[in-house]
Image: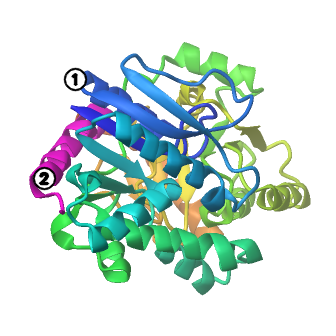
Amino acid sequence: MRILRIIYDWPPPWQGLGPHPYELTKAQLRLGHDIDIFCGRWPKAGSIEKPEGVNIHPILREPFNGAIFFTSSLILFFKYLSFRRKNKVDIIHSHGHFGIWVYFYRFILQKFIPWAKELKTPFVVHFHNIAQDRWEKMEKQGQEIKAVSRNFSWPLTVFSDKKSVKVASACIFVSEENKKKAIELYGADERRCFVVESGVNPVLFKGVSDIEKEKSRNDLGLDRYDKIILNHGAMVKRKNVHLLIDALVLLPEDFKLLLVGSGDADYISKINESIKEKNLMNRVIQVGYTPYPQTPISYQISDIFVLPSSWEGTPKVVMQGLSCGVPCLVSGFKLSEDIRGLFYLENLEPKYIAQEIMRLFKEKPSVDIDRVTINYSWLKRAKEIEKVYDFAIKNYLV
């Protein structure tokens, strides 16, 4: 089968969604598929990742925040039309709103020229979040939304979502909650909605020996007696890293917080101010952006992973922690099954977060690594998506 994937985030850099489509693509190659990828490309980002069997069609990313809809996505649309005239694919798999004008194009064809050749190819849309749901939650929580986002980016993102559910032969959601919200807010056809949670690469994300763990800790100025709390991911307000800072104040001096990832500059500035005000400079280690192949180290040296998010899809960072054997204390989502070593926060009060961290350190819970490896490998996820493809091919809209 020849697959055309449309995805904005493709490494490098490895930030945001990048590792998800990359790992999924590699797993689909193992299943014998040929894959073409239309993706965003940062200038001077380094040599683009190109697994054998993949054809990359890079497009220059937006020149400034909010410009994607009339820059990169428009360029994508015209390159897509050119590609489709010359190439036959068996299925199109698009992630997110990078394909906004492709969705709109197919919507117009579906409405006025339903016999068009373009519509003969099944179209799968992959939702990693539901834009309108996030927008409403941000407003409910009183979070600041910049003018360009409120009046421009968010409305177009919602427009993209709504058009994509109308043209999709099948929709993939990373969580049951996202699926429910798409049905509720966008009128998505439940018969064409499927849940495929995020996966993990268990070969890359695995535990290490105590000797290797201590060596890596020493490299960061840590020792075997430090109790390391890890938070890895985008530093944005909905991740509530500031609450984790507040919780750290309530923990003994030997508890230290390792922050891995980049994010919103204003939010990071506020975090840094809070660290200074609370005199935590010696207890918070900030690593910043780390390329995906090096991220396992942060899990391997940590004792516990904490993600106090307001909302999530199915965060790949949690699956990575569990795969490394690190207990995870999380919020903002719930997996479809219970896994030993995964714990949910009932509220986000710093005092409660600190109490739960202390409890887990005392209890020293184990993690069911085998279950994670078997049920959440990217190969398993690729096989689940095969079933979605089969449905789309048999039931595509014309």
Indicate whether residue 384 is drawn in magenta.
yes
Residue under label 1, please give it: 32
Q: Earlier in the sequence, mark 1 or mark 2?
A: 1
Amino acid at circle 2: Phe
Residue for point 86% across, 46% down: 281
Magenta highlight range? 376-398
Asked if the residue at tag 2 contacts the one at tag 1, i.e. Cβ–Cβ closer than 8 Å, the answer is: no
Q: Position of residue 187 (x, y in %)?
A: 30, 80
Magenta-span inclusion, residue 387: yes
> Residue sitting at 25 percent across and 58 percent down?
116
> Residue 244 appears at what percent x and percent y?
66, 59
Q: In the picture, residue 348 is in which quadrant?
A: bottom right
Q: Residues within 10 Å of mark 2 (few under 14, many from 20)?
A: some
| Image coordinates for residue 298, horizontal then vertical, percent | 60, 32
Give the camera-side residue of 185 and 235: 185
Question: SS at mark 2?
Answer: helix
Query: Total number of numbered labels?
Result: 2
Question: Residue 391 shows which numbered tag?
Answer: 2
Q: Is residue 106 above or below residue 36?
A: below
Name the foreground residue: 19 vs 105. Answer: 105
When asked about the image quadrant of residue 142, the answer is: bottom right
What sort of colour scheme is used for the picture? rainbow
Callout 1: SS: loop
Q: Residue at x 32, y 51 (%)?
A: 197
Looking at the rendered structure, the kind of residue marked 1 is Gly
